[in-house]
Image (spheres, rainbow, N blue to C red):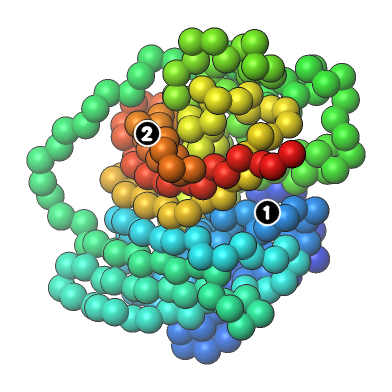
Amino acid sequence: MTGASSPADSGGPAERLVDLLDLERIEENIFRGHSPDEPLQRVFGGQVAGQALVAAGRTTDGERPVHSLHAYFLRPGVPGVPIVYQVERVRDGRSFTTRRVVAVQRGRTIFNLTASFHRGEPGFEHQVPMPGVPDPESLPKLVDEIREHLGSMPEPLERMARRQPFDIRYVDRLRWSARDLEGVEPRSAVWMRAVGPLGDDPLVHTCAVTYASDMTLLDAVRLPVEPLWGPRGFDMASLDHAMWFHRPFRADEWFLYQQESPVATGARGLARGQIYDRRGRLLVSVMQEGLFRRKRD
């Protein structure tokens, strides 16, 4: 990454994602990221988390990959308005490096993140096995499923689909009405990969998966209550987000995102995810809580 970005940059969705993660260094520990002027109520949370992790990583020596992050979404970001990321160098130890990042927009804190980086060490290994699912090539693209069901997509949705940086393929069929929800459990799984090459910087791939991790995780919470595609009965918002990175990976190669919700109560739902590569290796573990506030008539 070059260290400068512009919302006007052209190119395909993958190039725009790399550009989105390419922050401008303002001061030694201060960075600025652009936010696309999309027709959305708020800035996508995965974008803020990915950019904050880039800012944290830019203040390390680059030899210790991130192994975990913990973050809170405090206020909705405004699309089209730059976001400033202020990094605190909490600790530089012999094996671990810790950074704290505060994201500020229009003088107000909208997000904070703590990330830990670890120098690789040998050790024992075990993991839960990847579930058996169809290969991604055998599944339809999400945009194709939507077009098939609707006949054609509204122009704003079509424009967003053209800019989508990830190819998403749901393992189970999409449910479009309440009649499809009978017996549905709070689980979901998708295959994902960036729609084009993202280069060879490991930090870019880590931050790209951080971006993607916020795209479908709360599906598992909603599934027993309402269809994923159709009018929403709830105002939704991500509240916090945690990730643990277990192995190196590339975000432009297929990965399976297995998701489930162990509990929903008090207008909040908890979701956890496990990300596997095609070899069945567990790459990343994710936890997120979301707000699900029923809309008033």
- For the N terminus, give its image quadrant: bottom right
Residue 236 place in picture, x, y as percent: 59, 45
Q: Which residue is mark 1?
A: 15
Whether residue 147 is visible, yes or no, is yes
Could you tell me which secondary element the residue under label 2 belongs to? Answer: strand
- At horizontal 69% and vertical 42% (from top left) the residue drawn is 296
Q: CA distance from mark 2 to mark 1?
A: 37 Å
| Relative vertical location of residue 276 with respect to residue 194 in this rendering, above or below | above
First in residue order: circle 2 vs circle 1 = 1
Type of residue at label 2? Val
Percent of width and height locating residue 7: 75, 66
Percent across and percent down for residue 215 are 57, 42
Q: Residues within 10 Å of mark 1 (few under 14, many from 20)?
A: some
Asked if one can make out residue 191 in the rendered structure from this viewpoint, the answer is no
In the current view of this chain or complex, which residue is farthest to the bottom? 27
In the shown orientation, is residue 201 left or right of residue 64?
Answer: right
At x 72%, y 63%, the residue is 79
In the rendered image, which quarter contains the C terminus? top right
Apparent side of residue 199 relative to residue 99 in the rendered image (left or right)? right
Residue at mark 2: 263
Residue 181 percent across, percent down from the top left: 57, 15
For the residue labelled by badge 1, is the local secondary structure a helix, a strand or a loop? Answer: helix
Along the viewing direction, whichever of 154 and 110 lies nearer the viewer: 110
Q: Would you place residue 260 above or below residue 33 in this image?
A: above
Horizontal placement of 203 versus 115: left or right?
right
Q: Nearer the viewer, residue 227 or 151?
A: 227
Tell me the amino acid under the disc marked 1: Glu
Q: Residue at x 38, y 81 (%)?
A: 88
